[in-house]
Amino acid sequence: MVLAEFSMYPTDKGESVSHYVAQLIDHIDKSGITYKLTPMGTILEGSWEEVFGVIGECFKILEPQCNRITTIIKVDYRKGTESRMTSKVEKVKTILQREIVHA
């Protein structure tokens, strides 16, 4: 199972690029992949093929509209099929024996 945190945005469209990011989030949402939107990026969970397929599709959405695109990807792979998107946070709470503040 792959957890990938990524951000993708044009760097040639001025200070605010939320219109472009929204197009990507719409695509991710419609893809059916498990994801979590954060203020600094999006976390995807699935097989290598699923995750990188969606990231590639996001690039193809921006490519015709933008002359320059920045993409940052951080990947964690672990064998197995168990969802880790929430279990990793739950593990830390268990170790600390308390709730932690997070969005």
Image (cartoon, rainbow, N blue to C red):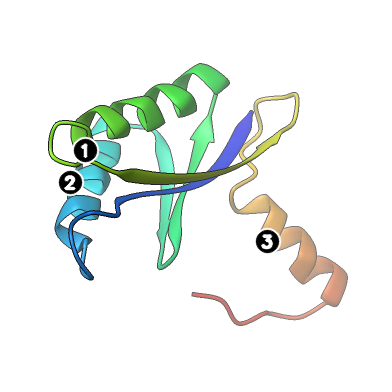
As measured in the structure, the alpha-carbon distance from the residue carrying label 2 to the one carrying label 1 is: 9 Å
As measured in the structure, the alpha-carbon distance from the residue carrying label 1 to the one carrying label 3 is: 32 Å
Rendered location of residue 52, percent (x, y): 47, 25
Which is nearer the eye, 58 or 78?
58
Neighbourhood count class around disc 1 (C-alpha, 10 Å): few under 14, some 14–19, many 20 upward:
some
Query: Is label 2 in a helix, a strand or a loop?
Result: helix
Q: In this picture, is 52 found above or below 16?
A: above
Give the residue displayed 61% in from the left and 38% down from the top.
83
Amino acid type of the residue tagged 1 in the rendering: Leu
Please tell me the numbered disc located at residue 62: 1
Mark 2 — residue? 23
Amino acid type of the residue tagged 3 in the rendering: Val
Q: Are marks 1 and 3 in contact (CB under 8 Å)?
A: no
Q: Earlier in the sequence, mark 2 or mark 3?
A: 2
Please tell me the numbered disc located at residue 89: 3
Q: State which quadrant residue 31 falls in.
A: top left
Neighbourhood count class around disc 2 (C-alpha, 10 Å): few under 14, some 14–19, many 20 upward:
few
Position of residue 61 in the picture relative to residue 73 (left or right) = left
Which of pointers 2 and 1 indicates the residue nearer the eye?
1
